[in-house]
Image (cartoon, helix red, strand yellow):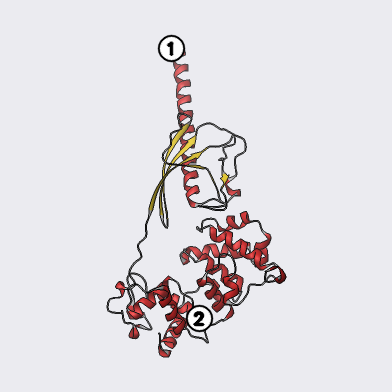
Amino acid sequence: MLSASDQQALLNWYDEHQRDLPWRATDDPWAILLSEVLLQQTQVARGLVYWQRMVEAFPTVASMAQAPVDAVLKAWEGAGYYSRARRLHALSQRVVLPAIEGGFDGRLPSSYDALLSLPGIGPYTAAAVASIAFGQPVACVDGNIRRVMARQTAQPAPAPTDVQTWADGSLHAERPGDWNQALMELGATVCTPKRVRCEQCPVAPSCAGRSTPERYPLPKRQRIKSVVMTAIVDHDVQGRPLLHQRPSAGLFGGLWGPEYLEGRVQRGEKYLHAGVVKHQLSHRSMTVDVLVGVSPVASDGVERAAVATSTLDEKVLALATRALEASMSNDEDKRRSYEKKEVGDGAEV
């Protein structure tokens, strides 16, 4: 556990060196919860953009509860892991319910257990919001705190229960929100996975792993699955793509996109091979062949800006559009060349 002197040193460091992040300048529990949900598996630099967008679109929990889930997905567009947005919408609808119906009368609950009962809220988020927004003495654990703990105790693979026990024992009860943020800030900016800045660490004197920090903790092995798919991009007479909304469950649930088929598929002369899109997810490496229809097939295409799509869909649609435009341009050039040739031949006769 960290000593009282370590606690004071870390809080002093945090007070002086913490990053200027907008959710740290508010005491609005809803804005703080939005930041914690967004920053799960999203880097802070990107999270800033999406947090601002979400706060502007849904300034209160009630405003999100009243909106359709498609509007939430649209505002979330580009942030990834869209199940977070769907669960956040479900959370807002639960919160605005009357207490007699299992809700919280429109106000976020302040206790760890009540927060943990909400859709999409796990132990980390419940502890972070309870401590930061409501001052509850609850220790949270994320990847940054786990790394700090592993190095402080020189443990290459600490068990989750051991990390939580260490965090609980090290908690500064009088400033729990600042304390949790200070530990996470230390892991994010000083006690980083690589290029560790031990000389800047306020708790370096008590760190058992200081001499070889890169050994702690051992990196987790990630299994990356390779997936090959074919995207079929058709369009209507106005040039709008034919998009379909996916079921809420599954990859990119609730988002719109073209048809995807497993493996590499051939579709004949009516389709142009636009190229290949490479896309990386956390546990999946995707290679997508893009086929674009050369002739309109319907009149009910979708305005791209009106629906929420994934980054993969954006890549696929952009590639398909470029290929179709190039094909039409080439056809026009061929037509003009043919017309000139006919005129020339006729003049010579």
Give whichever of 231, 95 is nearer the camera: 95
Q: Which percent across, then down, holds residue 291?
A: 46, 37
Q: Residue at x 60, y 74 (%)?
A: 114
Label 2: which secondary element = helix
Check the picture and name the quadrant holding the N terminus. Answer: bottom left
Q: Residue at x 47, y 65 (%)?
A: 45
6 vs 323: above or below? below
Label 1: which secondary element = helix
Q: Say whether residue 60 is visible.
A: no
Classify residue 301 by image quadrant. top right
Give neighbour class at mark 1: few <14, some 14-19, many 20+ (Cα, 10 Å).
few
* Residue assigned mark 2: 178
Q: Which percent across, then down, holds residue 221?
A: 35, 62
Give whichever of 143, 22 is nearer the camera: 143
Mark-to-mark CA distance, 2 and 1:
88 Å
Give whichever of 235, 65 is nearer the camera: 65
For the residue marked with disc 2, what is the amino acid? Asp
297 vs 260: above or below? above
Q: Which percent across, then down, holds residue 184?
A: 44, 75
Report the side of 37 relative to 288 (left or right). right
Q: What is the number of callouts on the image?
A: 2
Q: Earlier in the sequence, mark 2 or mark 1?
A: 2
For the residue marked with disc 1, what is the amino acid? Glu
Q: Determine the residue located farthest toward the left in the rendered image.
A: 211
* Residue assigned mark 1: 348
